[in-house]
Image (tube, helix red, strand yellow):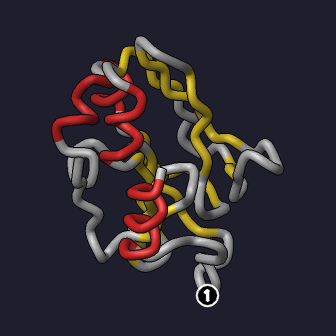
Amino acid sequence: MAFEYPDDLKYLDSHEYVRLDGEIATIGITAFAIDQLGDLVLLELPDIEDTIEKGNKENDQSFGTIESVKAVSDLYSPVSGTVVERNEEMIEAPEKIAEDPYGEGWLIKVRLNDPDNPLEGVLSAEEYSAKVEAE
């Protein structure tokens, strides 16, 4: 099944995406992740003003969890910074994330710690697409 991966986003191999707008990063999960998880039932996100660290499975720096009928998955941030907004609508109704994962289905917005060099180790849409299509 082919999914859309917008070119204006950067991706982690753990299936999160980031969209930069100045020093604010919007973070969400990809359509591929949603498909793999199945029906989403619970979303736990950090509070506003919480500090999050760039994370991955190796350093165990998750910023939250998302639960489906199949599994619970940690959420990892492609950037470090302070949470300035969280999507309360998705917390209340996580199943809505699947309707528009790259638009209304975003999870958190973060003010970057280092706006001059925010994205290391992220994948382009083309790189991410090639990776997930191989899975």
- Residue 7 or residue 49, whichever sits in front: 7
Q: Quadrant of residue 104?
A: top left
At 24% across and 54% down in the image, what residue appears? 3
At 63% across and 40% down in the image, what residue appears? 63
Q: Quadrant of residue 100?
A: top left
Is residue 133 left or right of 47 when viewed as pictured? left
Residue 16 drawn at (x, y percent) = 48, 52
Indicate whether 89 appears above or below 110. Answer: above
* SS for dot 1: loop
At 38% across and 15% down in the image, what residue appears? 41
Count the marks: 1
- Residue 24 or residue 69, whichever sits in front: 69
Indicate whether 70 appears above or below 79. Answer: above
Q: Quadrant of residue 126?
A: bottom left
Is residue 63 left or right of 66 when viewed as pictured? right
Indicate whether 121 appears above or below 49. Answer: below
- Residue furthest out toward the bottom: 116
Is residue 121 left or right of 103 when viewed as pictured? right
Is residue 85 left or right of 63 when viewed as pictured? left
At 44% across and 63% down in the image, what residue appears? 18
Indicate whether 28 appears above or below 112. Answer: above
Residue 119 drawn at (x, y percent) = 59, 76
Residue 103 drawn at (x, y percent) = 22, 52
- Residue 132 or residue 72, whichever sits in front: 132
- Residue furthest out toward the front: 134
Quickly name the residue at label 1.
116
- Residue furthest out toward the right: 59
Residue 64 drawn at (x, y percent) = 59, 33
